[in-house]
Image: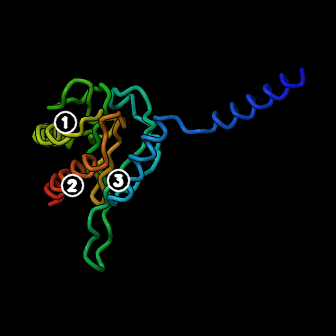
Amino acid sequence: MTWLVFVAVGLMLFGSIYWLKPSARDQRLADLRLSAIRAGLQIRQQTFKVDSARSGVREDITATGYTLMLPAQPHGEKPRQALLFRVVGQTGWETAGLPDGWAWHDLPAGKDHDRQLAAAEQLAPQLVRLLSSLDDGLVMLEVFENRITLFPAEQKTASAEKYLKVLEGLKSVADGLKG
């Protein structure tokens, strides 16, 4: 009878230690994120509160962001950090040039809106071409004057090399918008 107690204690110890082991998904994500850090990207978990009244996008976004910092401004010049554009992987009202399930977010209201929407529509084919090379789903993309942050779905087909390649391709897009 005492051997049953030893077996039960042994199974409890084994089970609790085995339970602490990371799952295959957790290990894959850790490897992906470590590869991205080694490639020079900054990684950060973030929640973005959408403006559903203005954009039509309904769900807030919580995802891991892969950020490529753009070269610093010349010495003495104040760093610029303004948002150039944002695309979300959800349906919304502003979809000019984007595939189904994607929407522009934070386009300015008022008289600049039509000009910005036309510029976004011209930018869309290049953006779609770059993002389709990811072999991953798009959760959100933010392009600022000083950085580009990609929020991918981190699917099994994801790789840090593809993320870096897309972010570097978007760097030329951002330079064209700034200039």
Which of the numbered marks, if any, corresponds to residue 132? 1
Dot 3 amino acid type:
Thr
Residue 110: percent from the left, percent from the top? 25, 39
Residue 117 visible? The answer is no
Residue 12: percent from the left, percent from the top? 75, 30
The residue indicated by pointer 2 is 168
Which of the numbered marks, if any, corresponds to residue 67? 3
The residue nearer to you, when weighing 137 against 87, is: 137
Determine the residue located farthest toward the right in the rendered image: 2
Q: Which quarter of the picture shows residue 133?
A: top left
The residue nearer to you, when weighing 66 against 87, is: 66
Residue 56: percent from the left, percent from the top? 34, 26
Left or right for 116, reference 109: left
Dot 2 amino acid type:
Glu
Asked whether disc 1 touches disc 3, contact meaning CB atoms under 8 Å apart, the reply is no
Asked whether disc 2 touches disc 3, contact meaning CB atoms under 8 Å apart, the reply is no
Residue 177: percent from the left, percent from the top? 16, 54
Q: Residues within 10 Å of mark 1 (few under 14, many from 20)?
A: few
SS label for mark 2: helix
Determine the residue located farthest toward the bottom in the rendered image: 76
> Disc 2 and disc 1: Cα gap in Å?
14 Å
Left or right for 129, reference 149: left
> Disc 1 and disc 3: Cα gap in Å?
18 Å
- Which quadrant does the C terminus fall into? bottom left
Display coloring: rainbow
Left or right for 41, reference 11: left
Dot 1 amino acid type:
Ser
The residue nearer to you, when weighing 35 against 97, is: 35
First-in-chain label (1 vs 3): 3
First-in-chain label (2 vs 3): 3
Q: Residue at x 15, y 56 (%)?
A: 172
Above or below, 173 against 78 in this view is above
